[in-house]
Image (cartoon, helix red, strand yellow):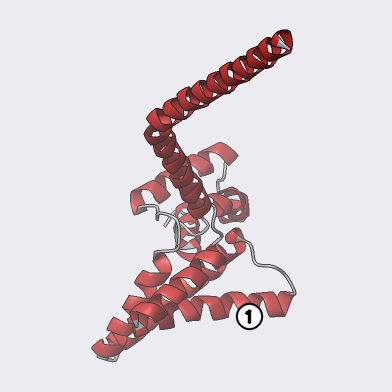
Amino acid sequence: IEMKSTIVLLAILLLCLVSCNSWMTNSLYMHRINNRSPVILKKSMRLLENVNDASSNQLTLKAKLSSDMKDAMKQKEKTRLAAIRAIQTAIKQKEVDDQVEVSDEMAIAIMSKLVKQRKESIKSYNDAGRQDLVDSEQFELDVINSYLPKQFSEEEIIKLIDDEIAKVGATSVKDMGKVMNTLRPILLGKADISSVGEIIKKKLSGK
């Protein structure tokens, strides 16, 4: 009986030692985690911010327009909202007419045409002395331009044209297409293509 009692007592002591060791291990682990939690949290926040920034940068122009439209509605910015809707309408019209999904490149081409239209309207309204309409068109023009890539300066455009003329060996207006074919994708959305064409024509015609 004494032997059995001794065995039982030893078994109980062993069980207590195992439980105590397990508790101490868990406590030490939790202590380490708690001490590191601010660092872990900070890293997690940074990672989340990076993901959000990347998602923002990857927004298509159509998605950006949709997001900005909602913001304009929320802020009750009627003139900005009208300008954004004008862009969306032009994009939607392109999709309906050609049965295509408008890409960013296509959207830039569409907005470049809208820029040209607004500039022509501004000139017409200026000539008619309608400053109110000039201001309205100018505001829409500014909104449209905000979605386009940074515009080339006149000096940069002329340098690109001169370099390309020399590169392809253009000597007359007949070579104008060779120059335009290379410059068009470079300047699309970053310059008025029709104005670029006029500059090239004048240079090649010797005017």
Q: Residue furthest front?
A: 1
User: x, y (%) of residue 57?
Assistant: 49, 51
Q: Which of 25/93 is in front?
A: 25
Q: Nearer the viewer, residue 74 or 192?
A: 74
Is residue 102 found left or right of 1 in the rendered image? left
| Amino acid type, callout 1 | Gln
Which residue does the image show at 61% across and 64% down from the upper left? 106
- Give above or below for 134 relative to 18: below
- In this image, 123 relative to 201: left or right? left
Image vertical order of residue 147 relative to residue 177, above or below:
below
Look at 68% across and 14% down and name the residue there: 5
Residue 9, given in percent of the width and then of the height, sits at 63, 15
Judged from this view, the residue extending furthest toward the top is 3
Q: Quadrant of the C terminus?
A: bottom left
Q: Quadrant of residue 21?
A: top right
Question: Crowding near pointer 1: few (<14 within 10 Å), some, many (20+)?
Answer: few
Residue 133: where, in percent of width, then height? Answer: 31, 88
In what quadrant of the picture does the N terminus appear? top right
Give the camera-side residue of 173 and 12.
12
The secondary element bearing badge 1 is classed as helix
* Left or right of residue 175: residue 50: left
* Residue 154 seen from this side: yes
Q: Is residue 119 visible?
A: no
Report the number of numbered marks: 1
**Residue 10 percent location from the top left of the image:** 64, 12
Reply above or below: 125 against 36.
below
Residue at (41%, 44%) from the top-left corner?
159
Which residue in the structure is indicated by mark 1? Answer: 93
